Image (spheres, rainbow, N blue to C red):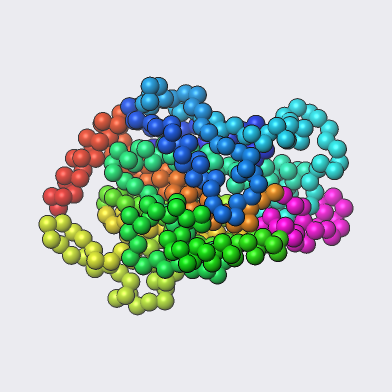
Amino acid sequence: MLKFLTAGESHGKGLVGIIEGLPANLNIDIEFINNELKRRQKGYGRGKRMDIERDKIEIISGIRNGKTLGSPIAMIIKNRDWENWKEIMDVENIRLPKEKIVTRPRPGHGDLAGAIKYNHKDIRNILERASARETAMRVAVGSIAKQLLKAFDIEIYSHVIQIGKVKVETKNINKEQLEMADRSPVRVLDKQAENQIITEIDKTKEKGDTLGGLFEVVAYNVPIGLGSHVNWDRKLDGKIAQGMMSLQGVKGVEIGMGFESARRLGSEVHDEIYYENQYYRKTNNAGGIEAGISNGNNIIVKCAMKPIPSLGSPLNSVDMETKKAFEAQKERADVCAVPSASIVAEHILAWILANEITIKFGGDSISEMKDNYNRYIDYVNSR
């Protein structure tokens, strides 16, 4: 079973990640990780922070000569913006000027609830860790998971299907089209919708407001049999939903047809089963998962992301120290981060599937895992 842990604040010295449980002798491409980090930083509507950071991974243990050792992998991403925040974020016991202490919680953030829960007078102690900056390390972790999945021919792609009120037609999209998503600054597969979304983002920025949207993540070549029906915490769709909801701003998750299935008859929802040398379906309304188990079809996940709560024109709030009404604290933020979130979601799904692959075919080395996998596929094909 795979495990990972991240640490670090948004404006601290950097982000740290530790991965445990990977098999030995897995090929790791550091440039692939760095390219995935670049993908996360792109997208029309991002804030000025992306002009400062140039995320790059530094591996300090667990990999030698381009291969995993089987021991824990430790990684660092340094924050370039730390130089501008040394005084505020220093670990030493320094008395901050009163004007540097944040006491006005922002609606939609964890500021108020977190400050009360952890008994903090300075809300920055909450917002720094709650920030989506944390997802940079999750992308690095997921990039290693993607390289494990590659050994089993599993690929993951994503694209944006709606920002604000602008929707994109998503029927009959194939892998070749999804490979083109990064060519769009908003990661949509429709040029007309792209132009409309860019215009909408510009208008929203002028108003000091923000935009949310929908994105879709698709995993190809997932074998039948990942996950389990036998207990609630082993269901694959349950794990995916939890993983996606852990992404900052995500407020809804659908697998396959999702909420639309509630509006249809059973005969319009369930994927009929056929057999010709092997089992297959003509539809994939289930999104590749039935009873918590992957069924051999592509896994399709949709996520709804709320508008970013840090507004240029702040909402009403209350100062936690004086209890007087104020406009909420302003923080540097994006107008729209849906394209970036779709990239992070790829890596969340990659980690979950890599863990399930490890549970199902686990071994101490990648060759042992592949032998177990190949025997299982031979068994599946014989049924």
Q: Is residue 90 magenta?
A: no
Q: How many marks?
A: 0
Q: Is residue 50 left or right of residue 37?
A: right
Question: Is 21 or 197 nearer to us in this picture?
Answer: 197
Which residue: 29% across, 57% down? 297
Residue 8, image x, y percentages: 61, 36
Residue 330, image x, y percentages: 75, 52
Which residue: 75% across, 46% down? 123
Q: Main secondary structure of the magenta part?
A: loop
Which residue: 48% across, 49% down? 343
Question: Is 348 or 313 nearer to us in this picture?
Answer: 313
Q: Is residue 36 visible?
A: yes
Q: Seen from this angle, which residue lies furthest top?
A: 65
Question: Is 18 or 13 nearer to us in this picture?
Answer: 13
Q: Is residue 310 magenta?
A: yes
150 relative to 287, above or below: above
Which corner quadrant of the image does residue 96 belong to?
A: top right
Which residue: 26% across, 52% down? 224
188 relative to 23, above or below: below
Q: Is residue 139 left or right of residue 204?
A: left
180 relative to 36, above or below: below
Q: Is residue 356 left or right of residue 279?
A: right
**Range shown magenta:** 308-331
Residue 136, image x, y percentages: 54, 41
Q: Is residue 141 visible?
A: no
Residue 312, image x, y percentages: 72, 57
Q: Quadrant of the N terminus?
A: top left
Question: Is 173 or 354 nearer to us in this picture?
Answer: 173
Q: Is residue 16 left or right of residue 204?
A: left
